Amino acid sequence: MGNIQEYKCPCCGSAIVFDSAIQKMKCPCCDTEFEMEALQGYDDALKQQEQGDDMTWDTAAGSEWQDGEETGLRTYQCKSCSGEIVGDESMAASSCPYCGNPIVLMGQFSGDLRPDYVIPFKLDKKAAKVGLMKHLNGKRLLPTIFKDQNHIDEIKGVYVPFWLFDTNVDANISYRATKIRTWSDSKYDYTETRFFMLSRGGTIGFERVPVDGSSKMEDDLMESIEPFDFSEAVPFQTAYLAGYMADKYDVSAEESIERANVRVKKSTEDNFRSTVQGYNTVTVEQSSVQFHDGSAKYALYPVWILNTTWNGNQYRFAMNGQNGKFVGDLPVDKKAANRWMLLSTVAIAAVAYGISWLLWLARIL
Amino acid sequence: MKRMLKQLACMTAAVLLAVSPFPAAAMASEGFTGEYERLIDMADLLTYEEESELLETLNEISERQKMDIVLITSEDMDGYSDIQEYADDLYDYCDYGYGANRDGLLLLISMAERDWYISTCGYGITAFTDAGISDLGSAMKEDLSSGNYASAFYTYASECDQMITMAREGHPFSKKDLPHAPLSPLVLPICIVIGLVGALLIVGSMKAQLKTVRKQTAAANYVKKGSMQLTTQQDLFLYSKVDRVKKPEKDSSESSTHTSSSGTTHGGGGEKF
């Protein structure tokens, strides 16, 4: 005797038996009928999915400093937030880019890894100020006083450390999908739902997925000013730091990987999902991704930063120093919000009431 | 059984007619059978004078409009459980109606449960839409409820006259002819709610403008160009299911019809009073 093969019902999960009367597999629980081939295919697809995710990386990013290369660099520390930043000997700025308090020279820069790449600043301080003004304009619920109080000159250019992750991904994803058809006769409306199991497998490559390596810089703020164009990156030279500050990484590549994994997995799933077409509903049943040749690089990306305190809350703005994308959450003027709420309620209600009367006159209501 | 009861009812009517001073034959004119009077007051709701005046009115309108306008009152349901069947059978067995299509309508008042029902036939189905019948009902309702039967029945006669004229002119009474109810007082609070929801959306979008810091969920910008290769692609059909839902009933701007026990098509409608 061969192996006894047991199949589970794709509809309700109970064991399925062969019904000799209809020469088909039939679920004793929910009475759904299946072709033999459909069940075999379903079973094979399920087995393929069982391998789970594998996300391994080689995180040897950055390199050692060459002799004497870092002699022109100095480390500064903020006494208030204990942020540590790097600048060259001639760094003019003397306040912390994160909290605005004075920073003090700690001494000769030493240790840490040497960045692999740097994207030089493309937009200057003037462009950053224009960016801020644009960001504040046209926002009706922004307290007007907020604009005046901004000490806009405090805007600072900072090289922010990023880990860049490269990887190739093997993906196997299965979906449950339905196709719905409707028709009617004189008495009834019919809806036919056809259930499918879809499998998609293949490979996809990612390069330089950035994850912010500074704990002082919020991840969401840095992700909001993406993307940076890596084609403008150059191999790191200390000369690029002149006139700007540089943050030291304090989150290691290993600690940053989790964020990259989440984003890469989501994008992989999105890309394979786009190959599923022609169905009314599609839900992911199982998804497994395997990473190959994962590697990391260490780079500095240019960011303009402005911190401001208003009514006891701190607001931080950031601008992509390469393409000028400006972000930063702003406070809501509660009085203005209430005023707008009242005005629009009255206006819309009045219009709706007017339309009701017109409809009544037209004998539609 | 019902058929027998029906014949009994007609016989009762015939007896009443025999006593009446108007001979049935006098009513007979071209197109009408004239077998029974157009007014049979078995429940005795009208006085003798009222009865004869009303009958004259019904006869006049019926002959002018070439449609039988019949009114029958009954003390009980005569063994029927459904007033629609009762009215249809009265119409069919008493041979009412004008011409080959038996154009006409019959108002049956049953005092047992205080029901009224209008059964229409032939051109009556066209002329008396569901909206028309419900309008007729509401016009009579107050008088019926307070016992002013003669007044209710005159209303019935004149409304029938009007509705037949409207139909002959090509516009059978429809929803649009119903008296226009004033704008519901609920409309204002509903408009305020709409305003509130709209304002929430507007102010919400203004607030959303102030929030620009968002996490990236994916890494779509960093996919290597042309690196995606699909090696497995299988779409496997598993099973199918068919559900059916009964269609909703038609609305009242048309005349709904049914078939009576004798196989004639009738329209109609009724309520309690």
Image: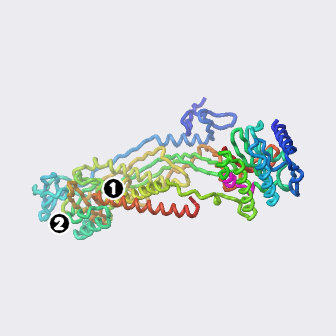
- In the image, A74: left or right of B266? left
In-front residue for pair A3/B77: B77
- Chain for numbered disc 2: A
Q: How crowded is mark 2: few (under 14 residues within 10 Å), some or many (20 or more)?
A: some
- In the image, A266: left or right of B160? left
In-front residue for pair B112/A286: B112
Q: Is residue A58 magenta?
A: no
Q: Residue furthest front?
A: B49
The quadrant in which residue A103 appears is bottom left
- Which quadrant would the C terminus of chain A be assigned to in this image? bottom right
Say which residue label 2 marks: A243
Q: Distance between the residues labelled 1 and 2?
A: 30 Å
Q: Which colour scheme is used?
A: rainbow
Where A132 sits versus A173, above or below? Answer: below
Which span is picked out in magenta? B125-136
Look at the numbered disc 2 and give the secondary structure of its residue: loop
Identity, as a three-letter code, of the amino acid under mark 1: Arg
Q: Residue furthest right?
A: B25
C-beta proximity under 8 Å, tags 1 and 2: no
User: In the rendering, which numbered label is found on residue B124?
Assistant: none
Label 1 vs label 2, nearer the camera: 1
Where B83 sits versus B185, above or below? Answer: above
Question: How far across and how far down the image is residue A333, in percent?
Answer: 28, 59
- Which quadrant would the N terminus of chain A be assigned to in this image? top right
Look at the numbered disc 1 and give the secondary structure of its residue: loop
Q: Does the magenta stretch include residue B133?
A: yes
Q: Which residue is drawn at 12% across and 65% down?
A: A90
Say which residue label 1 marks: B214
Please say whether residue A66 is visible from this viewpoint: no
Question: How far across and how far down the image is residue A160, in percent?
Answer: 24, 58
Please say whether residue B194 is visible from this viewpoint: yes
Could you tell me how many numbered marks the image carries?
2
